[in-house]
Image (tube, rainbow, N blue to C red):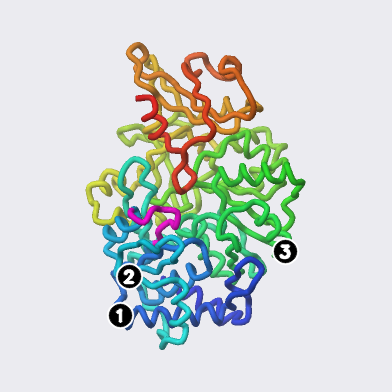
Amino acid sequence: MNPAEWLIRAALRSPKAPALMRGTELVATYAAFASRAASIGGWLAQRGIGPGDRVAIFMTNRTEYLEAFYAIWFAGAAAVPINGKLHVREAEWILENSGASLAFVSDDVAADLHFEPKIDASEMAQLYDHAPLEAPVPMGPEALTWLFYTSGTTGRPKGVMMGARTIEAMALSYFADVDEVHAEDAVLYAAPMSHAAGIYNFMHVIKGARHVVPVSGGFQPAEIFALARELDSVHMFAAPTMVRRLIDHAVASGETGEGLRSIVYAGGPMYLNDIEEAVSTLGPRFLQVYGQGECPMAITALSRADIADRDHPRWCERLASVGTAQSVVRVKIVDEAGTELPYGEVGEIVVEGSTVMLGYWENPKATAKTIKNGWLWTGDMGHMDADGYVTLVDRSKDLIISGGSNVYPREVEEALLTHPSVKEVAVVGRKDPEWGEAVVAFVAIEGALDPAELDAHCRANIARFKAPKEYHVVDALPKNNYGKVLKTELRARLD
């Protein structure tokens, strides 16, 4: 199924419905959105671009991003979205590795980009009157649709191949397992449209909802709250660090979240203390999704009801989990040999189903290492309870073995974050001649705090052997362009 078919259907059903918005300003109705995509798609086809070709998008958030997406799919090609926060050299590497035939760009990030041919977002308007394609080029289930490059915190990013089937299953699973979408809703793109925020466009196109890019083009809590009040029934994706900033702003300003219907959080660890405060501050607006680029947004889901139901006897346990398997996948916890483990035992999370990637772009070795007998080995460690709720423990590569005992950094981080002076924390292992590895915590705090107080707090909440041997107070934790903490950089500081 070509995703552009969904756009055509929405335009036929509600041609005058608002589709693309810049803040509260209407940019295009669904009829205009579909017409622009068909015309730009016709221009791509005239250049010989079609099925099997890759077309990149290196832009900051803007409504033209969605026009470029659907133009690419109209022509039957695959979109290669590149985070606008990347350096041009990083973008050039992705363009070269993907073999992109063309790039849609915005000058605010691509002025120094050495790549041709490219077309600037401001030039796209000149293509609105080009002879359109009469219909989207058909796509089979395995047709490459979205080539997503991983964040590459430990080396060069890998290109994750998503087929038309992957996108279709992910979108339909959202309706079944995550949230409803209605025509009167608005999806707000405050996180990079190259990633999870952008991949959630499909559900809202299917339902003919509004697509809103903030005037700032990014994440500004005050702007988001103001837009939500004005637009009403707003959905948005937010990484855990974004949720934390929203809550801090709400507490400081008295914002209630009026107009925000759903905040789907994913993309990193959401600490129990943070989501408890989020629900207390803004109410039952939160939903959690667990996925990876290799299985986009579609491994497990934790429902709004589970997050909000404080009366459930296991509410805290479920709140600390990532929910249950989505409808289109099977999820297991296995040992190193692939044997499924009993409930409660920690192992690697593996997933099988129609949302699993086709493989890594031109990297069969990495594909074979990650997909075994049809199962995606996520590299995430976790356990499952008897009701099917999966709780993440850590990335397998982040496990610390100290004195022969396993220490999962997230457990230590959760304990430290319950201290009122701790803003953020990351725990890593340092080589130690006596213990093998020593537990080390990097902590950002508010005000002054003696590390001895942190140590006492930690030891009062978790086993003594898990408590950090060292505490490093920092102004902020290093993060990549996706908001993920760079533990590799923290480990390097200890060398």
Residue 128, position in %: x, y? Answer: 47, 83
Residue 242, position in %: x, y? Answer: 58, 46
Q: Amino acid at mark 2?
A: Leu
Pointer 3: what residue?
A: 230
Residue extent of the magenta highlight:
81-89
The residue at the point 57 percent across, 14 percent down is: 452
- Mark 1 to mark 3 CA distance (whole Å): 42 Å
Above or below, 69 relative to 239: below
Q: Secondary structure at mark 2?
A: strand
Q: Secondary structure at mark 3?
A: helix
10 Å neighbourhood of mark 3: few (<14), some, or many (≥20)? some
The answer to whether any part of residue 442 appears in the image is: yes
- Hey, which quadrant is residue 460 in on the image? top right
Q: Amino acid at mark 3?
A: Glu
Q: Contact (CB < 8 A) between labels 2 and 1?
A: yes
Which residue occupies the foreground of this view, 151 or 318? 151
Name which of mark 1 and mark 3 comes first in the sequence: 1
| 108 horizontally vs 430: left or right | right
Which residue occupies the foreground of this view, 342 or 84? 84
Q: Quadrant of the N terminus?
A: bottom left
Q: Contact (CB < 8 A) between labels 1 and 3?
A: no
| 47 horizontally vs 24: left or right | left
Q: Amino acid at mark 1?
A: Arg
Q: Residue furthest front?
A: 112
